[in-house]
Image (spheres, rainbow, N blue to C red):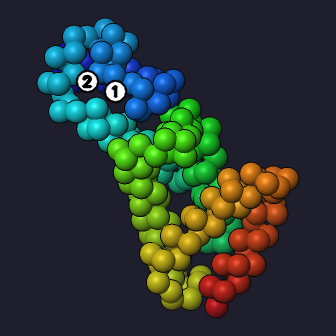
Amino acid sequence: MASDRKRQIIEAAAQSFAAFGYKATTMEQIAKLANVGKGTIYTFFKSKEELLDEIVSGLIMEIKAEAELAMDSSLPFSENVHRALYRILEFRQRHQLTAKLLQEVRNIGTAAVQEVLAKLDRAMVEFIRQKIDAAVEKGEIRPCNSEITAFLMLKTYIALIVDWEKDHEPLTKEQIAELFTLYFLQGLSR
């Protein structure tokens, strides 16, 4: 069935990108891993870039689902935003493909990979923005530019978890929550 073949190709490409990186992966490798002819790949995807985009679109849905699972409607926005952001970054670091793509951007700067990671970040900012808008609507936090606030929240989380650890002892989940509350949530509180 065509949808099964497409799924095989996507899984093989994700496996290859995770193992070798985007730049080092060839359509021949993907075809071999998927157990299909190279021409079969092109019936579903015009290019390796399109295949990567499809994989990242699936990752975005997975990350959003993970973030939603981390949230609890009985908890206040301040707790839920921390839980969701922590889960998003945990997923990004744990997921072999995103880890490899992040490493490739740092080491090589592959344009196609930078583009899909930017798409991933935009999707996460949009997800957080929606949660901020809902919290404003409920009166949990004061009105703000939700897109900028979401962007800053995501980037701050990345900085505290990823960048800080390059030269310092990793922060605990509690320390991150404390800093996040100090820098963001107190400023947004009513």
Who's the residue at 68% across and 53% down the image?
Answer: 162
Image coordinates for residue 159, horizontal then vertical, percent: 66, 61
Compare residues 177 and 117 and report the one nearer the observer: 117
The reply to whether callout 1 and callout 2 are in contact (CB within 8 Å) is yes
Who's the residue at 59% across and 82% down the image?
Answer: 140
Can you tell which mark lies on residue 6? 2
Image coordinates for residue 3, horizontal then vertical, percent: 23, 24
Q: For mark 2, give the secondary structure.
A: helix
Query: Which residue does the numbered mark 1 point to in the structure image?
Result: 10
Residue closest to the far front:
108
Quarter of the picture holding the N terminus: top left
Residue 141, image quadrant: bottom right
Image coordinates for residue 18, horizontal then vertical, percent: 49, 28
Q: For mark 1, give the secondary structure.
A: helix
Horizontal side of residue 157 vs 179, given as left or right: left
**Crowdedness near tag 1: few (<14), some (14–19) or many (≥20) residues, C-alpha within 10 Å:** many
Query: In the picture shown, does residue 9 fall above or below 184?
Result: above
**Crowdedness near tag 2: few (<14), some (14–19) or many (≥20) residues, C-alpha within 10 Å:** some
